[in-house]
Image: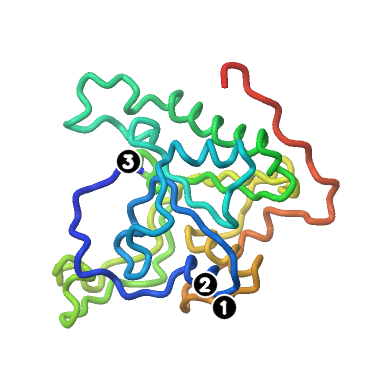
Amino acid sequence: VQTCALPISPLFKLPSLPRSLEKVKLTWGNYGGYAFDFIEGLQGQRKFTSEQFKKDAAAGKLPTVSWLYAPHDASEHPPGNNDAGNPLVGNVTHGMQWTVDQVNAVVQGGLWPKTAIFITWDDWGGWDDHVDPPNVEQWKHDPQHPEWDGNRPAWNGTQFRYGSRVGCLVLSPYAKSGYISSVLHSHVSLIKFCETRFGLPPLNARTADADDMSDCFDFARQPAAPPPPVPGA
C-alpha cells in the first residue's frame, strides 16, 4: 500500500471491526497500515511496523485478526517521482517474494491450521478493466461534513462503488483447491467474513449486505497441508 500525505484531523467518528472485536474480548493488530489513523478511537493503537508481522507470525503470536500492509518498496506500485534510484519499487518479483515470506512465517509459527489469509490489493496497477463494474451506490456530498469528501461537491452523484476489479487470493487449510469464485466480492466482504466467523453484528448496511467469502471455503474437506517453503524465501 502506498501512503499519501493526507490530513488526519478531524477524525472520522465511525464504528470499526477492531472495536467490535474488542467487545467480545478478541484481539487485533495493524501492521504497517495508515488508514486506522483516520478513525477516532483507533489512531495510534495496536500499531506495528510491517516487519513486526513476520516476527510475530514466526513466533506463533499473532492477534485474532491482523491487517498487514506491505512497505512501499514491496507494494508492487509503479515507481513515483520520489523513487528514482530504488530498483525495488515497482519490482513485482520483489513484492511477490515479500508476500511469500509473510505466509512462510505463518506456517513456521504453527498457525497454518487455524488461519485464513486473504491477499489482495488496493488497486490493480492502473490497468483498465474490460468489465464495467456494477453501479450500486453514488457519492452523496454532505455540506455539513466537508471533511468527509475533501470538500469536493463535484463528486456528488458520481459512482461510489464498485471500482475496477482487483485480485484476491484465499489461503487456508479449508480453502477450495483450484477454485475461481464467480461471486461478487468486495473489500467489504473481508469485514463480513470476520463478522460471520466471530458472530459480530454488522457495522453498517454495507457489511450487512456483503458476501462473506464463504463460497471460497469447504469446511467439510480434509484440511490441506501448509504450502511448502519456496526456494530462496
On the picture, is 109 further left or further right than 146? right
Image quarter (top left, top right, bottom left or bottom right) of the N terminus = top left
Image disc number at residue 201: 1
Question: What residue do we see at 46% from left, 77% from top?
Answer: 204
Question: Measured along the vertical axis of the image, is residue 111 above or below residue 216?
Answer: above
Horizontal and vertical percent position of residue 42: 37, 64
- State how far apart marks 2 and 1 are (Cα): 8 Å
Horizontal and vertical percent position of residue 183: 60, 59
Mark 2 against mark 1, which lies toward the viewer?
2
Give the structural element (helix, strand or loop) at label 1. loop
Question: What residue do we see at 81% from left, 45% from top?
Answer: 223
Q: Are discs 2 and 1 less than 8 Å apart at CB?
A: yes
Question: What residue do we see at 62% from left, 46% from top?
Answer: 170
- State how far apart marks 2 and 3 are (Cα): 34 Å
Question: Measured along the vertical axis of the image, is residue 209 above or below residue 98?
Answer: below
**Based on the displayed image, in which of its 4 quarters is residue 226 positioned?**
top right
Give the structural element (helix, strand or loop) at label 3. loop
Q: How many marks?
A: 3
Residue position for label 2: 20
Image disc number at residue 4: none
Amino acid carrying label 2: it is Ser
The mark nearer the N terminus, 2 or 1, is 2
| 166 or 35, nearer to the observer | 35
Image disc number at residue 126: 3
On the picture, is 227 further left or further right than 10? right
